[in-house]
Image: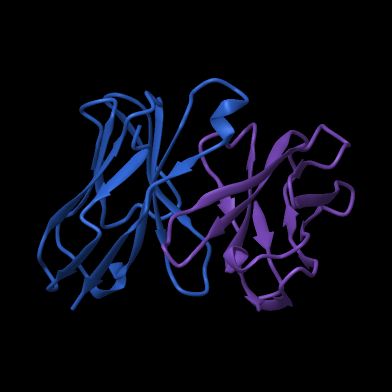
Amino acid sequence: NAGVTQTPKFRVLKTGQSMTLLCAQDMNHEYMYWYRQDPGMGLRLIHYSVGEGTTAKGEVPDGYNVSRLKKQNFLLGLESAAPSQTSVYFCASSQRTIPNRDTQYFGPGTRLTVL
Amino acid sequence: AQTVTQSQPEMSVQEAETVTLSCTYDTSESNYYLFWYKQPPSRQMILVIRQEAYKQQNATENRFSVNFQKAAKSFSLKISDSQLGDTAMYFCAFITSNTGNQFYFGTGTSLTVIP
């Protein structure tokens, strides 16, 4: 049982390049989330998914797209990377049923630098 | 608006001593859940303790306990018998029943345990 895993762990992009971050969970969780963490700020929600085939915007969705084609995977895409997207990205998952839904399990994070 | 405030950016404590990290929050909801997460240098977010707002009894998990003051919207974390492994960034967070898909995080407190 690996929990939540993220690929890659580090990445450096040039402005305008695209990339996809992969999040995978093996806990059969319905809900999955993408956050970004910037210095001096708490985690901010980018997008989330409440089930396979569904996604929704969070607090800071601009410049990102997501897809949830399989229940265990949640992909975060950057179509045209900008230096403002330099950050550490965390994926998380949780169960659907209350009250377990409120406990999120986090992946180890991906450090992305956009030059 | 839902907000979380951690007013102590950095703290330190001697090994084996007790330290308290403060957190205040703001929400108009009556039903919500509060959390403390730990983020060690490995960057992975680890759940430390969880408190349901409808419960008056303060949550405890081994050396970790909270002081939950609902009227004051205060949720402090006490770490007893501090250990070197407690050195990490600590984040306070909450989720409400009406914003069931989004966590709100504070900006974090960096705790250093001094041997």
Q: Is residue A71 left or right of residue B59?
A: left
Which chain has been coloured purple in this picture?
B
Count of numbered badges drawn on the protein: 0
Q: Is residue B93 left or right of residue A16?
A: right
Query: What residue appears at the point 14 percent right and 56 percent down from the top-left corner?
Result: A19
- Where residue A94 sits in the image (x, y, percent)? 47, 32
Closer to the camera in the image, A55 or B62: B62
Quadrant of the rendered structure where residue A97 is? top right
* Residue B108 visible, this orientation: no
Query: What residue appears at the point 82 percent right and 52 percent down from the top-left corner?
Result: B73
Q: Quadrant of the C terminus of chain B?
A: bottom right
Query: What residue appears at the point 24 percent right and 72 percent down from the top-left corner?
Result: A113
- Where residue B95 sits in the image (x, y, percent)? 62, 41
Q: Colour of chain A?
A: blue
Q: Against B113, is B79 above or below?
A: above
* Residue B73 visible, this orientation: yes
- Where residue B47 sits in the image (x, y, percent)? 57, 46
Instruction: Name, please, the residue furthest toward the top.
Output: A97
Q: Is residue B84 left or right of residue B71?
A: left
Q: Against A78, is A14 above or below?
A: below
Snapshot colouring: by chain
- Where residue B53 sits in the image (x, y, percent)? 78, 37
Q: Is residue B67 left or right of residue A33?
A: right
Query: What residue appears at the point 74 percent right and 61 percent down from the top-left corner?
Result: B23
Quadrant of the rendered structure where residue B83 is? bottom right
